């Protein structure tokens, strides 16, 4: 893979994020987000996926160190000074968090918050008001003029998340990092928000890094998938191919635990055991204590991420054995 591929808006190569003392929360991750495309980053709670999103936004706690390659439109981000980060975060890159209440100021009206970036850019008066209502409208908020005057607690969870999406759109981003953006919502609202994100993406040629623990949700929206386990990439490739024929036992386990993703003829089964923490990673392949295919080699040797078929990578010593498994 070429580091400076102009097709990629975001390029991550061999990214390591360490705690003081050297514990690797993220250990050698490669990931791309193509222009106008969506990369789904999937993993169980504690896999390091939110930490990766935080690193991409330059919001890691000061005690952590990051190294490797992290570039946005070929601009290297890891050594970027904070003022340039701030300009990027309010402009070309935006983040949508799981809980809209943490992203919204409870004491400010929605319109004021959605209009903050346009105001900082000098938009005033009637043009400012028009811009705010347009953003709320694009985020699918009905009766935008009325909702612009509301406080966050006066809106439903779904409308609050739409307001956060409107805020994210206000800087006219080219990349959105969406960290579990639908997890706090009920299933019907989840589907509507995913449809909205898909529509906005097509209309505005937005690229998205969509972080989730829920393979069902990610399968709704992602073009490419990166599966993270204990801070390392287990598998990566085009979403449909990965979901149809996983080439890592962990992905197979995730898919098998979801009836809508799993083959209809088989019974859905939860993944056995608990997720390994990056802070307490088992030796060799971190998945070996839970893996039905584990052998002695797996306990000793860390599997390298290898291209198994064109465009598809797996970090399993025995990935080839899964090529013919349905
Ligand atoms: Fe399972 Fe071994 Fe493959 Fe790890 S390397 S996923 S333990 S078979």
Image (cartoon, rainbow, N blue to C red):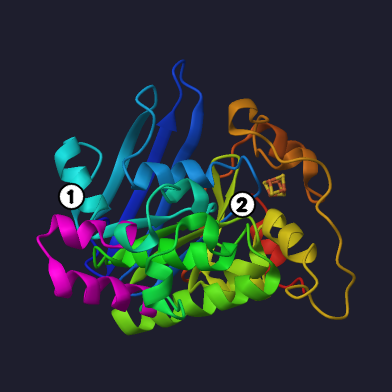
Q: Quadrant of residue 172?
A: bottom left
Is 325 part of what is drawn in magenta?
A: no
The one nearer the camera, 61 or 31, is 61
Residue 127 on the magenta span: yes
* Mark positioned earlier in the residue sequence (2 or 1): 2
Considering every residue shown, the one lying at the far top of the view is 21
| Quadrant hosting residue 290 | top right
Indicate the position of residue 245 as horizontal and vertical percent values.
67, 72
Q: Which residue is mark 2?
A: 43
Density class for disc 2 (Cα within 10 Å; few <14, some 14-19, many ≥20) is many
| Dot 2: element | loop
In this rendering, the count of numbered labels is: 2
Residue 291 image position (x, y, % from top left): 78, 47
Judged by depth in the image, the label closer to the viewer, 2 or 1, is 1
- On the image, numbered disc 1 is attached to which residue? 87
Residue drawn at 64 percent across, 71 percent down: 243
Residue 236 position in % (x across, y down): 52, 61
Is the magenta region chiefly helix, strand or loop?
A: helix
Residue 109 occupies which quadrant of the picture? bottom left
Q: Residue at x 46, y 80 (%)?
A: 142
State the residue at coordinates (56%, 67%).
Answer: 158
Q: Is residue 6 left or right of residue 37?
A: left
Would you place residue 99 above or below residue 36 in this image? above
Q: Quadrant of the N terminus?
A: bottom left
Q: Is mark 2 within 8 Å of ligand 1?
A: no
Extreme residue toward the left, this view: 122
Which of these two is toward me, 153 or 50?
153
């Amino acid at each position: 893979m070429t580091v400076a591929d102009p097709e990629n808006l975001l390029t991550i190569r061999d990214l390591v994020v360490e705690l003081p003392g050297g514990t690797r929360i993220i250990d050698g991750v490669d990931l791309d987000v193509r222009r106008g495309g969506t990369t789904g980053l999937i993993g169980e709670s504690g896999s390091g996926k939110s930490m990766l999103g935080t690193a991409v936004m330059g919001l890691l706690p000061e005690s952590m160190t990051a190294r490797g390659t992290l570039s946005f439109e070929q601009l290297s981000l890891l050594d970027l000074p904070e003022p340039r980060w701030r300009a990027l975060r309010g402009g070309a890159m935006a983040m949508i968090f799981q809980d809209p209440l943490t992203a919204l100021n409870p004491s400010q009206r929605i319109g004021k918050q959605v209009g903050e970036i346009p105001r900082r850019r000098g938009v005033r008066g009637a043009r400012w008001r028009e811009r705010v209502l347009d953003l709320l409208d694009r985020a699918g908020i009905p009766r935008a003029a009325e909702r612009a005057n509301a406080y966050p607690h006066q809106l439903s969870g779904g409308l609050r998340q739409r307001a956060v999406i409107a805020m994210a759109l206000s800087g006219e981003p080219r990349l959105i990092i969406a960290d579990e953006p639908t997890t706090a919502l009920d299933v019907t609202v989840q589907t509507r928000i995913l449809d909205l994100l898909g529509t906005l993406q097509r209309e505005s040629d937005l690229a998205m890094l969509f972080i989730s623990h829920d393979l069902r949700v990610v399968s709704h929206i992602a073009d490419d998938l990166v599966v993270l386990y204990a801070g390392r990439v287990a598998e990566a490739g085009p979403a449909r191919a990965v979901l149809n024929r996983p080439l890592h036992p962990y992905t197979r386990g995730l898919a098998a635990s979801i009836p809508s993703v799993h083959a209809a003829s088989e019974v859905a089964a939860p993944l056995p055991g608990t997720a390994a923490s990056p802070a307490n990673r088992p030796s060799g392949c971190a998945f070996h204590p839970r893996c039905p295919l584990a052998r002695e080699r797996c306990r000793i040797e860390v599997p390298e991420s290898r291209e198994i078929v064109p465009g598809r990578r797996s970090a399993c010593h025995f990935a080839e054995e899964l090529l013919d498994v349905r």
